[in-house]
Each structure stands twice: as C-alpha cells, then as structure tokens.
Amino acid sequence: MNGTWTLTKLALKRERLIVPLWLLLLVALAAGQVQRYATGIPDIAAFAREMAANQALTAFAGEIPSATLAGMAVWKNADAIYTILGLIMILTVVRHSRGEEESGRAELVGAGVVGRLAPLTAALAVACGSAVLAGLLTAAAMAATGAGAAGSLAFGAAITAAGLVFAGMGAVAAQLTQTARTAIGVAALGLGLSYVLRFVADGSGLAALKWLSPQGWSHLVRPYGDNNVTVLLLSLAFTAATLALAYRLLTRRDLGHGLIPERPGPAASDRLRSPLRLAWRLQKGLLAGWIAGYAIAGLVLGALATSIEEVARQGAAVEEFFRRYTASPEATMTDAYLWLIVLSLGYVSALYPLLALLRLRSEETTGRAELLLSTPVSRARWVAGHLLFALAGTALILATAGLTMGLVAGAPGKVLAGALVQVPATWVMAGVGVLAFGLLPRAAAAISWAAFLFVNLFGEVLGPILGIDYRIAKYAVPYPNLPMVITGAPFTATAIAIMTGIAAVLVAAGLAAVRRRALT
C-alpha cells in the first residue's frame, strides 16, 4: 500500500474538473425534477396514478415509490442517475488503474516506492469517495426542496450504493483485460445486463428479477415510500466481494497484462492490404455489439408498444407529453411512444461514432498510427477508413433498431423511417469527434464525452428541468429539429440537409487539422 495517498492526490488532481461537473449534473437531475413537477403538475397524486397504469413507462423508470413530489421525482430520474453514476464509476476506476498500465505510466510509478496494490486502491478511493459525496449532496439538495429527511437520506444511500457496486465491477474488469478499452466494454456489459434485468422486471411485473440486478437493489429502496435501506446490504456485500476478487486477481497477474490473454492476429496476412480493411478489423467488434444491442432493444421496446393504450388528453403532464413528441392532434399514444423511443435511441446512438473515432486517438498514442503512416498511406486515407465505419455504422445501427421495433409493433415502414431520420443528427456528433481529434487530440476523449452528455442532457433532461422550452432546445442540439414522421409530421428535407451539411463541414475541418498537426 506504499504510495497510496500520493497516488490518490494525483488522481484527485486529474479529476478536479470532471468530478464537480458530474456531481452538479446528478444533483440537478434529482432536485431540479422536484421543482419542475412542483410548478408544472397541479395534481401530483392523479399524475402518479396515470403514470403507474402505464406498463411501458414503468419499465423505463421503475415502480413509483410514492405519490408525492419527491417520490415522483425519484421515479422520473433515479434510474438515469444510477446508470450514469455506474458508468462514471467504471470509467474512473479503469482510467486510473488499467489505463495507467496500458500507457506505461504505472510501470514508471512502480519503479519508485509504490506498493503493488497502491494504484488500484487510489483509483477506488477516488471513485468510491465520489460516489459517497454524490449521495450526500443529492440527499442535501432533496431535503432543501422540502422533501422528507428520511426519504432524502434513503435516496442518497441508494445512489451511493449503485456507485460502489459498479466501482467494484470496474475494478474486476481492469484485472481481466489488457487494454482499458476492453475493460470498459466488459464492465459496461455488466452495467447493461443489470439495466436489462431491472427493465424486464418492471416491464413484465416479475418483481423478483430485480433482486438479480444491482440497479434493482437501489430501486427496491423506494425512497420517500418504504425507505427500505436494508436491501442495500446486498450492494455492500456485492461491492466487498468484487473488491476482494479484484485484489486477488491483481496479485496473480503480471503488470501490463490481463488474465484474459489478447488474441493477436496472424503474423502474415493478405487481408490487411488497405487502411479500410485495417479499420474494419479494428471496428467490427464495436459495430457488431451495437447492432446486436439495438436489435434486442428494438424487439423489447417494440413489444411494449402493443400495451400502450389511448390516454385522454387531460392534465398538464399528458398535454406536455403530446406537445413535445407529436406533430398531429390525430396521433395516438402509441405513435407518441414509438417516436419517443426512436428519438431516445437516436440520442444514445450518438455515442457510437464518437467511440469509433476515438479509436484513431488510441492508434496514435500507442504508436501504431505512426508505423502505418510511414508507409504510402496518407493521413486522410487513414482517418477516412475509420470515418466510413462511424458514419455508415450509425445508419446500420439505427436501421436495425427501426426495423426490429417496427416489425414487432406492426408498423415497420413508419418506424424504420423515423429511425433513419435520426442519422444526420448523429452524423453531426461524428463531425464533432473528427474536429476534436484534429484540433485538440489530447482532449478529444473529454470533448467527445462532453458533447454526448450535453446533447443528451440538455435536450431531454436538463433542458426541461431548467424550464427551457423544447423549441429553444432546437438551437442547442440537433435532434429536436428532426421531423416527427411517426406522429404525423410530413417529411421535410430542410433539417436533414442542414445537419448533413454541418456534419460535412465539421468533418472537412477535422481532416484539414489532422493533415497539418504533428502526431502526439
């Protein structure tokens, strides 16, 4: 454990900007929703009954803990908070453990008076400490809105528990794989499985399945309702088990290696004769995973559409729902649901091209790009190979979701068209990724994640909480400008053409910057 405190201070210094930002985000999601409901929902009890009767909404957000302002705020955003915090914990732990080994810095640090367990301990100290702070700040913010103290503390404990669980999961993943990218993928798979179990449990009424989901354990607390914090003993036990396993695995492997060996390609191959083929080899795993995930999501979400019933257009909540997600008064609740799901899948799909393009930065920092560019391959061809999969892959992913969801919902053509409409907006995000890689390569990852979070949270979460009208959000993010073709809006090419043009300009500027800058 020698050097643990020094490495902890170093990690805190590196996280001095990131941690305050996501803490502010989580607190705003929780407490801001209380204020939004207080000003926009005149009868919170009637609103709770209406939402509880909708099985699809229950699947997305979970069961309503109580028919109060605070209880409905927890119902609306708690699952998003647990999921976002889980992802943050995974990224933080892997970054300061496996990421340091992959870059070679851990070996340099280890040459000093630093114990073998110190780097992982420092990473966990920062991640788990941040999770505890997130729970405390959220509890304080909720109490400041007038919510009950007991419920606020229970909610804060549920948030902290979710963070601790996925910090432990990230620590184990960091020992299993040789690269940070793969470790994040393994841990994110666990996060996704946890979410799916919780989603199916609430969507199907099989509440027992929630006991198999780490996120489900936090849901079972039911803040401002039962306040059943004893269920979090499962979270603590799971965290303790994963941390013990992570330390055990750490002592049984070599520095820089994972317990799951990498699968190198053949020493000689005639399949990598062009940058495009090389890009395919590097990108095919990521693309296949996204396609499979969206295909499953389309099937599940499309099946839920059949249970959506017509709802009388009464009350502020329903009126707002239709105003935001429909373009015709004749649109049904099912149409609104399908468009909302397609739009949500579009928002999430913005992450794929960013991750695909960040592979360029990974190739650069490891030195493989320099070796490739020492051949007659130009920088433009190198980038273009990965860019092709980022752009075409986005269209294929969304088309897969639209087709599977449309077939199950009984409207394949309409839903597929709605899914494909999302493509140009996602290409804008790809343009941001290329531009960041060209102009500020060292900050490309941070810029990409910041752009993704901004678009998702400003457009669909923080914007409404802050009282920003949906029409105003159109000036900040691309997705609200898309024609709502599923809900009766005629298809117009204006917004599509503008977004495609913006994406082209960003890509061209990024390629020009890549050609002029030095490799770092």
Image: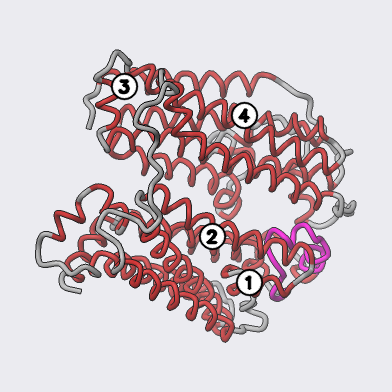
Residue 302 placed where, x, y %? 78, 46
Disc with the residue nearer the chain's start (2 vs 1): 2
User: Mark 3 sits on what residue?
Assistant: 513
Q: Of tags 3 and 4, which is closer to the observer?
A: 4
Q: Secondary structure at mark 2?
A: helix
Foreground of the two, 236 or 134? 236
Q: Are marks 3 and 1 in contact (CB under 8 Å)?
A: no
Left or right, residue 489 beside residue 395: right
Looking at the rendered structure, the kind of residue marked 4 is Ala
Left or right, residue 320 beside residue 230: right
What is the crowding at mark 3: few (fewer than 14 residues within 10 Å), some, or many (at least 20)? some
What is the crowding at mark 2: few (fewer than 14 residues within 10 Å), some, or many (at least 20)? some
As drawn, the label of residue 212 is 1
Foreground of the two, 499 or 437? 437
Disc with the residue nearer the chain's start (3 vs 1): 1
CA–CA distance between discs 4 and 1?
Answer: 34 Å
Q: Secondary structure at mark 4?
A: helix
As drawn, the label of residue 395 is 4
User: Mark 2 sits on what residue?
Assistant: 190
Whether residue 508 appears in magenta in the rendering, the answer is no
Q: Give residue 330's quadrant in the image.
A: top right
Tally of marks: 4
The structure residue drawn at horizontal position 72% and vertical position 75%, both measured from the top left corner, is 208
Looking at the rendered structure, the kind of residue marked 1 is Leu
Left or right, residue 491 beside residue 461: right
Q: Of tags 2 and 4, which is closer to the observer?
A: 2
